Amino acid sequence: MSQSDDTLLLANVSRRGLLKGLAGGSALLLAARWDLGLANEQAQFGAGAMPGGWVDDPNVFIHIDSDGLVTIVNNRAEMGQGIRTSLVLVAADELGADWDQVRVEQAQGNQDKYGNQNTDGSRSMRHWYDPMRRAAAAARLMLEQAAANQWDVPVHEVRAGIHKVVHQPSGKELGFGELAKAARELEVPGRNDLVLKSDSELRFIGKESGLINGELKSAYPKAIDGEDIVTGKAIFGADIDLENTLYAVVARPPVYGAKVKSVDDSEALKVFGVKKIIRIEGTGQPAAFSPLGGVAVVATNTWAAMEGRKALKIEWDNGPAGDNADYTSETYREALEKAAQSPGKVVRQSGDVESALEEASTRVSATYYMPHMAQTPMEPPVAVVRVKDGKAEAWAPVQNPRATREGIAGILEMDLENVTLHQTLLGGGFGRKSKPDFVTEAARLAKEFEGQPIKLQWSREDDIHHAYFHAVSVDHLEAGLDGEGKATSWRHRTLSPSIGSLFAPDPKHKGEFELGMGFNTMPFSIPAIRLENPPAPAHVRIGWFRSVYNLPHAWAIQSFAHEMAVAAGKDHRDYVLDLLGPGREVHNLTVGDGWNYGEDPDLYPIDVARMRRVIERATEEAGWGRETGKGRGLGLAFHHSFVSYTAIVFDVEVDEEGELTIHRADIAFDCGPQANPERIRSQMEGACVMGIGIALQSEVTFKDGVAQQDNFDSYLIPRVPDAPKVVRVHLIDNPDDAMGGAGEPGLPPVAPALCNAIYAATGKRIRRLPVGNQLS
Amino acid sequence: MINLTINGQQHELDVPDDMPLLWAIRDVVGMKGTKFGCGISQCGACTVHLDGVATRSCVTPVSAAKGEITTIEAMADDPVGQKVQQAWLDLGVAQCGYCQGGQIMNATALLKKTPAPDTQEIVDAMAGNLCRCGTYNRILAAIERAADKETSS
């Protein structure tokens, strides 16, 4: 790249101050904004610290045809968050492109060229907003320079408009397409020569579009994939259609770590269309992203493969699985609840909790349970792989292209550069498709069919039985209140198997990034605090599920804060605002968190004022304190995650039969600057519905190591009648702070807010999820 | 040999009688708009119209699919389907989009039969279609928008 890196000088200047001055748009301030001039290799935080870092070369991301068609490359996985629209509109707006002349090209998996592509952690917009604006601003400058050259006028006399460049003194114009060829040959300007558009010049960024609380706003910018989706033309992983494809399914060991003892495939081979049966060796534990092993059936269509699998007679050897074969959810829950009674590894401590609890006027104590859950994206895992001449080509709906290529290269024993990955649309991800085990499986099978594409399809049963499960959790909390009901002490023990067990011998304790998801970052201002993490072993594959460990932490903390308010006889909102204390910025290191979602603590402190603001907004909008009548009540919860702030209030009613009606959800959300408010709203709405499922329905249980739920008839997720009658999203206008995530932060407060509302309506306290039939 | 009429086109397929229509459409005919989500009629991603009736193709054997089969690919040519699609776009219903073909097929079948459904009728009709992204509130609003209340009341 030809950009200069002469912005290092600014590293010692107050970064937040400069960031807040961004609206002025001067080159100096803008230069300070982009990663403080630190090259990727030197960055400790943010996009630069990710593998592959960021890239802002316009030649990588923007291509303009001579007919004016602008192609913008999207390097992030599209799984429903709308990034193919949102990130592209950022670039298109800065460039000045006419939205109707913009098309999107999905980047192949190649982080050396495109920077980090791991679409996870609600990072896409906060890590790529600046690089994409810079890339587009550089392209715009190149178009202006090309026009100036052609007219032989000074470049300051020309200015890009919408899809054209204008010579201001004469009014002469040239379209982007007419300038494209000449612009492409120019040197890319240095970052310090870029001037981003001022807010008043923007057409798309930060502008509301779509439907807002019942009112339809501008239809632009139209969703990139909208028309393809409603006409059935959008191509997901399952829809890749290559000539001569063979179709495969795999029978995997029901218990994690088990192996095939024997297989009788004689009946399977008789099924019409079945071509071949292949045994796959599993890699044992820890499995990481490797196949679980088992027996594959390869056929001329998916149905034949599934029928063939049904006809297999397999005997499994549970020996290698060890005590995973004894894993039973009820027993495990009891064991964790017992372990929660004893002290665990201390991860944060201030004051003397034990004395404070002894001296308290009132002690409040509760234990909360959240079960295993499966992500169940509507498109089950699926991949197409073709191996030919020592090279592999894959088409797959994956969140993490780099790990996918590494998995394929590993199982096929080839170099990474011989693996090509075409990233399709994802029919949902939610963390499941961060793990490319299903692509590696397909590659393993494709090896046996030189030159012939293999499409490996997971059934829904496969998806639920062999998920990377959301960790089951027990959280035990105890608090002491003084005579006025004010909290004097807080002790929280959290127990969950760790995702660390997927990659290394089971650590049995949560890792830093797991504790940092809303546990040790608990923001209440209480004199004595002790946070502990007793051990919890893993017996299944544990993996990321949207919002990850924020789910149990928010569930327990937000339920318990309500229980404390009830014990104190105080209004819940007033009580939690008091617990939070006055607005202040809490540095993550001061609360024992060394992670902070990978972000700079100076730019992203835990900002109590912002937390208070979302609580105040959600409760105001919901009409907090209003008379609701018998059997009806309002419930509140809030949470900081992925460096954003969410509060939600539910208005629910429970009738005498225990039938729950969710009348309304009011969600207040602060992610700092908003690139595409419409898609932020959709993320909040969707998280609300998914969270209702977490609260009410979703649970995977195990018996003797085997998942007991098979499909959507037993693993329940929300349906239309479960949705709130009204969902209102209230976005906090906050352009001054650093940008936060939006895909995940909406989810953690949903279950506790709903259960707090159920308490307000009925007096029944839910401590074990899902609610199931506890109300009847 | 099995004969299927899909979107007005005849297809002669060499498949077993009990093959679900879904896999015949996807793997044999090669039309990919109809999706696999569960295989047991629990999610609705595979919804097609069989003689105008919303039908779960994942549990419909090809031998039972005698009649006019219509898929999401033909909805743009259907006046009601078109209105539903437009409402979906107007309200930005889709997130990942994988289930939305089935949602649109189901909604279109509802509006063809009941042009001005009340809210409860819409909720009841859509209860069999899952969306993991949780777009339900916009789905309901889009069907209200597409419903032809004036002409039918």
Image (cartoon, rainbow, N blue to C red):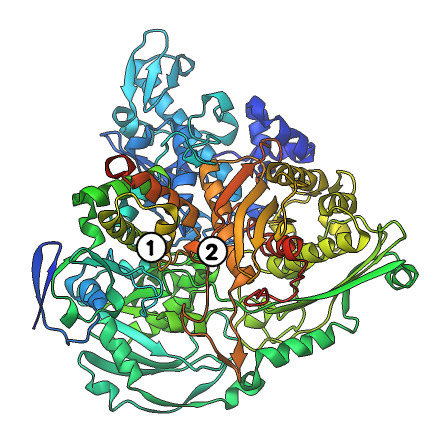
Check chain identity for marks 2 and 1: say if they share one: no
Whole-percent x and y of residue A272?
17, 81
Q: Give the label on residue B125, or none.
A: 1
Q: Position of residue A160 (x, y in %)?
A: 37, 20
Extreme-top residue of the structure = A169
Pointer 2 chain? A
Residue type marked 1: Ala
Q: Residue at x 20, y 51 (%)?
A: B73
* Rendering quarter of residue A301: bottom left
**Amino acid type indicated by mark 2:** Asp
Left or right, A125 with reference to A239: right
Image quadrant in which you'd find residue A58: top left
Q: State left or right for residue A506 relative to residue A156.
A: right
Q: Residue at x 55, y 24 (%)?
A: A27
Location of residue B65 with respect to A62 vertically, above or below: below
Callout 1 crowding tier (Cα within 10 Å): few <14, some 14–19, many ≥20: some
Q: Is residue A410 in view from this perspective?
A: no
The residue to which callout 2 is attached is A722
